[in-house]
Image (cartoon, rainbow, N blue to C red):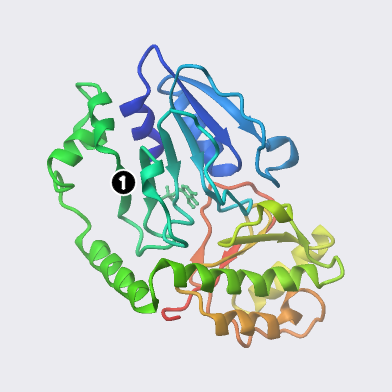
Amino acid sequence: MQFSMVPLNFLPADGVADYVSSGTWSKKASRRAKRCGRVNVAATTEETNFNHLPTAFNYSADAAYVHFTTNETIHGVEFMTEPYSGDKPLICDMSSDIASHPLNVAKYALIYAGAQKNLGPAGATLVILREDMLERVPEGLHTMLDYKVMAENDSLYNTPPCFGIYIIGLVAKHWLGLGGLRAVAELNQRKAGYIYQAIDGSDGFYRGHAEKAARSLMNITFRMPTEDLEKQLISEATAAGFNGLKGTGPWAACERRSTTRSRWRGAKRSRSLWGTSRRRTARGFAPLRHRMPRSTPARGISFCLRQPRW
Ligand SMILES: Cc1ncc(COP(=O)(O)O)c(C=O)c1O
């Protein structure tokens, strides 16, 4: 919904919006915006299957805003700093790395993030909107798509997803107990480090998808030596009770706020499942509870390990 709300609220009929396309999700966002108005794709890395971050940006002189996605869930590339947008309002989809590290929200005109990755259950979306942006919202939008209506009604224009919001509150308290987002970021560094070490130390058996400089701390993407091996992995994983792995881009080990360090150690112990031996053991893996979205490229596999505690 945010892919549509952003242009409906902030892309004037005679205006243009700049979109940075660094993976599946930012590309989808720009496509959706095209239904509402003129879009300039200021940069894209699609020609290399989104395996790095763009370095050159062809911004419009009069862009209504610049949109980018901090962390591309499917392709595993992550912006560690914002792309330069000059004095243009910076709008960002942070669905998959929100609250994974401290953030200076003052740099943004609007941040949106679906709750289901890092914050809590699906159904709630966090929107942080700079107040002056509300002056740009045109009259006559459908009420549920109008940020002004949401702001004027303290996000209570319709019945909010109370349970989801309650859980988000508990998750936030949990982070505070850990020492805040700085501590969460350190934990993420360590967890991602384990998996990248396994990839880099595999003598080329696992091939990281994202270039090292662009590697995400949240979604670690990799391929295996051949598609046959990937198929074998899928069938062995299915036999071991890991259903629904097939169907997305590169393999992605997705860290969620609920993935424990000990679980990653478990994943390391279970390397045999990942193709080096035919031993079918999933010991140490958490049960698979979450599948990546259906709407992603058809090749490869992606999955998330989830556990209800750190
Ligand atoms: C970065 C990013 N943006 C947007 C979405 C879409 O979220 P939803 O499934 O809530 O539409 C996803 C989903 O995985 C995502 O990873």
Q: Position of residue 83 (x, y in %)?
A: 55, 39
Q: Which residue is mark 1?
A: 128
Which amino acid does the dot numbered 1 rest on?
A: Ile
Q: Position of residue 278 (x, y in %)?
A: 80, 81
User: Closest to the observer: 152 or 135?
Assistant: 135
On screen, 74 above or below 202?
above
- Tell me the residue at 50%/75% (across/down): 259
Instruction: Classify residue 104 as left or right of residue 245.
Output: left
Quadrant position of the N terminus in the picture: top left
For label 1, the crowd category at 10 Å Cα-Cα, with few meaning under 14, some 14 to 19 and many 20 or more, is: some
In the rendered image, is residue 244 in sight? Answer: no
Q: Position of residue 85 (x, y in %)?
A: 50, 32
Numbered disc total: 1
User: Closest to the observer: 184 or 16?
Assistant: 184
- Tell me the residue at 55%/80% (across/down): 261
On screen, 285 above or below 125?
below
On screen, 232 above or below 89?
below
Of all residues, the one furthest to the right in this rendering is: 203
Of all residues, the one furthest to the top in this rendering is: 14
Q: Which quadrant of the figure has residue 175?
A: bottom left
Q: Which quadrant of the figure has residue 262?
A: bottom right
